[in-house]
Image (spheres, grey):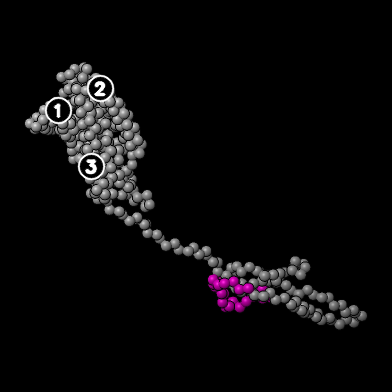
Amino acid sequence: MFLMYLAILPAAVLLYFIYKADKIEKEPTDLLVKIFLFGVLSTLSAYFLEVIGGGILDLFFYEDEMIYMIIENFLIVALAEEAGKYVVVKKVAWKHPAFNYTFDAVVYAVFSSLGFAALENIVYISNGGLSTAIMRAFLSVPGHAIDAVFMGCYFGAAKKCEILGDKNGKDRNLALALIIPVCIHGFYDFVLSVAEYYPIVMVAFFIFEIGITAYAIIKVLKLSKADTALVPQAAMNFDPMTGQPLQPIAPVQGFVPQQPVVAPMTPVQPVVPPVTPVQPAMNFDPMTGQRLTPVQQPAMNFDPMTGQPLHPNAPVQDFVQTQPVVEPVMPVQPQPIVEPVIPVQPVTQQTVEVFVPVQPIQYDPVTGQPVDPVFSPEA
């Protein structure tokens, strides 16, 4: 049981690392479990392909020949194992709606690859013991994860090309998603096979393994930081211009550029300030004779000059909206004051005729009532 834990632990640690690196949008748990389990099953297909390929190769070459080792490691073992991981990602995740960010492809490829590595590690450790578990924990299991990182990079690029309608780019990147991992995996196995005859090769192998591991870690961190949506507005569920909800974006086979949506504009009616209706009947103050600003004035029922009441049937003009009329101010001529002559009764005695001027009666132009001369405008 202890060896079983040692066999699974390296894959579990790497799965946790790659899952935490997916920062923007976590992938559905059921999808990741499905990819992992199919990755485990791909171990069986790889085993049968390796047995069949090795049997055919034995018919033409000897096992200790260089050509035998090259064909076995690159075209049989590496191709059979990486092709199984590749098919899992292509069939399970390629058209899934959750595949909408560039880093998603790396997550899918690593889960598929480590599903394969977990079962393979259990088989090797059950036969090799603790020393095999330690060696594979630092070499073989991380090696499968490194191959998956390169596979995921090219898978993401292929998905982006498909969305943009670049069929050539899609096909090229899908091919590289299989070829590059096969080359890295085949080189790893080939060096281990040759080291049996040339021990000095192990030095170059460890240098290569350290370098490619560091490169893969940097690549994962860089891809995680630069993770972007594959489809424009894939992370949005509303139109930022109108606020209306968007239809879910389904996986597309080709990218069709869309015209920008221009929201219809409601014509703006010019704002006309309200005009107060005026009555152009008077443009001066009847009290002072000064010019007035054209304003709304009520109709009067008396003559402002004489104070006499107007005819009761005279129509009162309604307020109408007209342009203010500016009339020249004419000087007001003073009206002559006609003083009534009071007749003097004759007396028998000597009398002196005294003429006392009588003040004319003034009227209030607002109310039409007589005004005391003391408070008249002339006073």
Residue density around tag 1, few if under 14, some if 14–19, many if 20 or more, within 10 Å: few
* Res 101 quadrant in image: top left
Residue at the disc numbered 3: 174
Viewer-proximal residue, 194 or 85? 194
Could you say which disc has been placed on residue 65 in the image? 1
Q: Is residue 80 above or below residue 314?
A: above
Q: Is residue 318 left or right of residue 135?
A: right
Q: Please state which amino acid type lies under the numbered disc 3.
A: Leu
Q: Is residue 167 visible?
A: yes
Viewer-proximal residue, 221 or 273? 221
* Res 38 quadrant in image: top left
Q: Is residue 139 left or right of residue 297?
A: left
Q: CA distance from mark 1 to mark 2?
A: 18 Å
Magenta-tinted stretch = 304-326
Mark toward the start of the polypeptide (3 vs 1): 1
| Residue 222 point in image, percent of width and height | 35, 35
Q: Is residue 323 above or below residue 244?
A: below
The N terminus, quarter of image: top left
Residue density around tag 2, few if under 14, some if 14–19, many if 20 or more, within 10 Å: few
